[in-house]
Structure formats: structure tokens, C-alpha cells
Image (spheres, coloured by chain):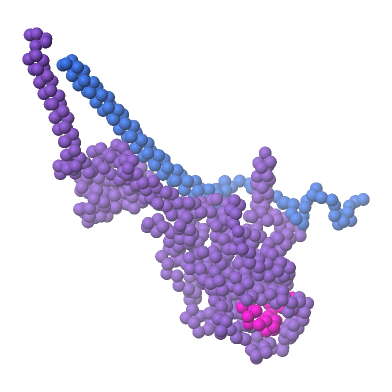
Chain colours: A blue, B purple
Amino acid sequence: MFAKLLVIVLSLGICGCWLLSLRQERLAITHEIALSHRRVIEQERNVWRMRAEIARRCSPAHLKLMRDAIAADWSPLERSLPTLFNPGPNAGPPSPTDEDHAPW
Amino acid sequence: MHPGDPQQQQRIMRASTLFIAIIIVGLFAVLARVASLKLDPPARLAAAAGSTNSYGPALARRGDLLDRQGRIIATSRVGYRLFVDPERVDDLRTIAVELAQLIGGDPVEYDKAIIAREESRFVVINHLLDDGQLDAVRQASLPGVGLEPRLVRDYVNESVGSLIIGRVGFEHSGQGGMEQRFERRLERADGRYRYQRDAAGNPLWLESAGYEQESDGDDVRLSIDLVVQEIAERVLRQAVEHCNAGGGRMVVLDTNTGEVLALCDILHDRADLPAITVDKDRAVHPSLGRNRCATDLYEPGSTFKPFIWSRITEMGIYQLEDILATPADGAGPYRTSRGRSIRDAHYYGPSTWEFVLVKSMNSGMAIAAEKLTERQMQDNLRRFGFGERTGSGLPGESIGMMTDAKKWNHYTQTSVAMGHEIGVTPLQMVQGFAAFARDGTLPDIRLTAVDDSQQRVSIVRRAVTSDIAYRTRCVMRKVMTDGTGRKSQSELYQLFGKSGTAQLPKAEGGGYYEYRYVSSFIAGAPLEQPRLVVLCVIDDPDRRIAHYGGEVAGPAVRDVMDEALQYLGVASDMPGETMSHQPEMARIATSLRDTDAED
């Protein structure tokens, strides 16, 4: 009988320890989750900060300043373009005016 | 001892029962203690237990304001406020000096602030730390010195359009401008979470029951284009300063969509001339003032004539070639049927109906206005949207000012035909004028960008027929080439427009100033497929420099039109003209997009 009781008590004790360890594990995990939550919040706030910084550095006014600071030669971009009334040499059939001035 | 001895077995049973009873009693005692600690803890323990249970704010982000290209105009981020808890500080005598070493500033001021609120547990030292200060405070980790997160609104392009954008107040809610206009979409709801922490204050775990989810605000993409806004503000400022005016307003409207691309309002302090208006809020901060493009009226003067002219043409009262009996040079001012004297800047003698608008002849407009009934004139104004809000939703938008139908008389009839005795907002003017640049219909004025995915059903309101709209446009083109807009001609685009110069009404009432004016110019371009309408109103230009709308406001409209259309990649419609690099870039971008789409 005593042996049976001992077994029961020991079993209960082991079960208790196992439950306690499970609880401790759970607490450790929830603690880790809490820390992760904090890290997520911190990262999110960093993203907000970087978003603002990127926006500031990409604003038209800032880009203009940067462009001026580079002092590069932008002339290739400033060449003339064919337009509605000035379609360029290969844009279509020659107009009567062109034919009038043709060497032939 | 015999194993089957009943006495022996009884003793074992008693011992076992006692043992079990002790264990059970012990367990119940533990349970009772736990219950007691939970339900009615001693004061000393309760204080400790309470302090380990904390709430943390879950800050939600206010929505961003974006321009129509998606560039950020206003965005929110988290900043940190530095505070001191005097109760937890190691040495109150040295903390101010330590803080000054970390974040700079005057230690005497810090010391004063701490001593003044020594009983408090929250003494703010700095409302917003910069990055360097924040790092220094975090590294120092002084006891009793804390950081409180708070939302900060960053205005990325502070110099551009601050008046339109507005600001947020202490509670991070909109105070004026777009921040206020779109408050419902931008606003956020902070959440909070409860967590257990240890004696050192470190979080142990979050309590699932105490968690309230935060809710971020939505981003709003505005119709404003930062580049066009910058162009408009720069040109308008130059125009205002050039003629030493009291202020200026400018609106740039996309005629196809009704999107407002730029909205500028400048007040200019002059040493030798009085201010045109008082805006106390703007004196507090430039972004808090009222937006006069929506709130303040002005008399449009001759820029109003096309609205009357087009309707009379549409009704067939006069055709373009019809001759009106306008007075010749030397014949003096025209007298209406009721004897009212109507003056012109120049007297050309009998003129065609087309010539009346090209030369902005008051006499011709008065003759035609007398052919309309009062009711017809009033209906015509409403057709173009005058006397009602444009629907922009800007705070304090005015409906304009029209003489009441009961008080409408012959004098009003002829005055309105010349753009007098009527008050309009710049937004109303561009909305009405856009009818000429479209197919005769009024656009919905939009402050948010048009989203292709939106299936919006808009009720189109027709002001004039498309044919009359086009004809009016062509006559206004002649205003630019042969009329009062000659000084405002563009070398790149065929503008059509109208100038106006009206006397400035006295703020206190009782008539007009004799030599103070409101000069304006409104134009659209290109002629065949208009893309933009630009209005410039110059308030009270210095008459010693210039004061006619065509001289003062016209060049500003032309400059904005040229730059903005090039930026938008609109091809020049002037024979022989070429484009600069910006449309080239736009074309390349378009071709790249097309290539991507094909891929």
C-alpha cells in the first residue's frame, strides 16, 4: 500500500514538475514573443523614419540641388525634338515646300 | 510482525491516511494562499504587483499625403520626448548637467524645470530629440531619465504649398488645408497593449486580453503636382514682387480631369502701401492661414466677358460678324438705354461681335447684355457654376457673391456683363473657364488624383455647346495675338485667354478705391487640345509700376503655362517650335512603359 502511495505521490510530483517546466517554457516563449513584438515595433518605426528621410532626399527641390551640385553636362538631354509642326527629316513624306527647294 | 496482522494493516492505513491528509491540507493551504494573494494581497505586495503590470501605447501612423505622382508631401514618424522622473533619479543635483552634456542646451534651464516639478514623475526636458541626441540618451541609460514615443509629422517639401497642405495640431489631427480636408481618411486610432514586466521594468510577456489593435490612417493622393506647384509659386512670387503687389493667387487646373495641379496664395508686405487683407492665423504659421483661392472673392473684371459673350453667341443674338453700334473715337462713352455711361479704354467705332471680345469693349458687352433678360443673365451665370461651391471641399470655400434676383436691375445687368458687381473665387473662375477648354462642360474640381481604377459616375453639366466653346476659344486666341494679351504670348504654345482689371473694393464697404486694382489673367493651352487652364490674380499691384491684367498677371500665366506644359510632356503647337529636354524625358519614359507593357 505504501509503495502504491509512494508511486502515486512521485507520479504527481513528476507531473507537477513537468507542468511547471511546460509553464516555464510557455513563459519563456511569451517573453520571446514580447521581445519580438518590441523589435517589430522598433523596426516599423525605423521604416517610418527612413520613409520620411527617403522622401526628403527625393523631393524635386532636393534633386534639383543635387543635379546642380554634380555640375555635369546635361546638354545631350537638351537636343531638339520633333514636334507636331516640325516632324524632323525622316518623319514622313516631303512637303511641297521641301520639293520646291529640292536640287532636282 | 505478521504481514496479515490486522493491527499492523490498520496502522499503515492510519499513517497513509494521515500522510495523504497532510498533503491535501498542504495543497489546500497553498491554494488558499494563492487565492489570498490574488484576491486580497498585502499592501506591500500589492504595490509591487501593480507596478509590474504596464500599458504600452501601440502608435498608429497617420496616413501620408502624396502628390499626384506619388511623391510624399507629408508623412508621420515616431519621435522621442525626453522626460525625467525625479523620484528615480540617483542624484538630482547633477542630473541637469548630465543631461546638458548628452543633448546640449542650458543645464540651468533643465534644473529649473526639474525643481519646479519635483513632486511630479514626468518632467519634460526636450519635446523632440534629434537622432544624435536620441542615441546619446539611449547609450547613457541614466536612471530616472525616460523616452516617450510620440508621432511627428514631417513636411518633406516644406517650402512648397504649405498653405494648401496645412498642418497637424498637438493631437496629430489636421489643422487647416488638406490635412483638415481629408482628416477622416488620414486619421488613425492608437491601440495599446498590456504587459507584465519584471522589477527592472523589462517586459516579460504581453497580456493577450489587454491588447487593442491600432489602426493606421489611409494615404491620400492629392491632385497637386509638386513640380507644377513649385513652378506656380516661384512665378507668382516673382510677379507679385515685381509689381509690388499686396498679394497674388494662382490656380493651375487640368482641364481633362478637373484636377487642381497647383494652388498658390501669397500675401506680400509692403513698406509704403497698406496690406490688402488681414489673416491672423497665417501670421501664427504660414500653413494655418485661409486659402484665399477658395475663400476670398474678387471682381473678375473683363476676364468674365467670355462667359457672357459665349452665351449670347449660343443664343444667336449676335453672330461673330454682326456689327454693334459701339462709339467711335471722340464720340465719348456709350450710353445705355437707361442712360448709364459706359466707358472703354479705346473707342473703335462700330465693331463686330468678335472684335468686342478681342478688344474687351465694355460698350459692346453692355449693348449685348441689354438684349438678354435678367433671368437669362442669371441662368447663364449658374450654368458656369457661379453662385455655388465648386465641390473642392476646401475649408471655408465661398459660393461667391451675386446680386439677389429681387435687387437685380438694369445697372446690374450691364455691370455683370463687364465682370463687375459680381464676386467670384479663383476656383470658380477656372472651373467656369475650363468649359471653353473642354467640350463646353464643367469639370468636377478635384483635389485628389484621378485613379483609373475608380469607377466614378460624374454628372456632367453643360455650360455651352462644344461648337460655341471652340469658337470662344478661337476668339480668345485672337485676344492673345491682337488684343490685351499680346504681352503674354507664348513662343511654345498657342494660348487662348482673357485679361481683366477691376477696381479694388474697400474692405470696410462703401465703394471702390479709385487707384487700387485687382488685375487678373486667365488662359488655356494648347488651342486645339487644351490641357491646362491657368489663372493668376494679382491683388493691388503698385500702379506706379503697372496695373493692367495683361501686363501684370499675363506674363506670369504664360511662364507657368510654358513650364508646366513642357513638364507634362505636351508637344508644342507653335509652328517651327521645338521642345526642350523635359518632354523628351517624358517621351522616353512613355516608350519605356510601353515596352514594359509589351514584354
- The image quadrant where one finds the C terminus of chain B is top right
Residue appearing at x 57%, y 48% in the figure: A67
Residue at image point 66% right, 54% down: B569
Q: Nearer the viewer, residue B483 or B257?
A: B257
Side of B227 relative to B595 (left or right): left
- Where residue B53 sits: x, y (%)? 26, 42
* Along the line of sight, the residue nearer the viewer: B515 or A28: A28
Q: Where is residue B279 in the image (x, y as percent from the top left)?
A: 45, 70
Bounds of the magenta span? B352-378
Closer to us: A96 or B336: B336
Q: What is the quadrant of residue B385 in the picture? A: bottom right
B262 lies left or right of A47: right
Q: In this view, does B243 lie above or below B48?
A: below
The residue closer to the viewer here, A19 or B191, is: A19
Residue under the image location 16 percent in, 36 percent down = B33
Whether the magenta-drawn stretch holds residue A47 is answered as no
Regarding residue B272, the answer to whether it shows in the image is: no
Q: In which quarter of the image is the N terminus of chain B?
A: top left
Residue B29 appears in the rendering = yes
Q: Residue furthest right?
A: A104
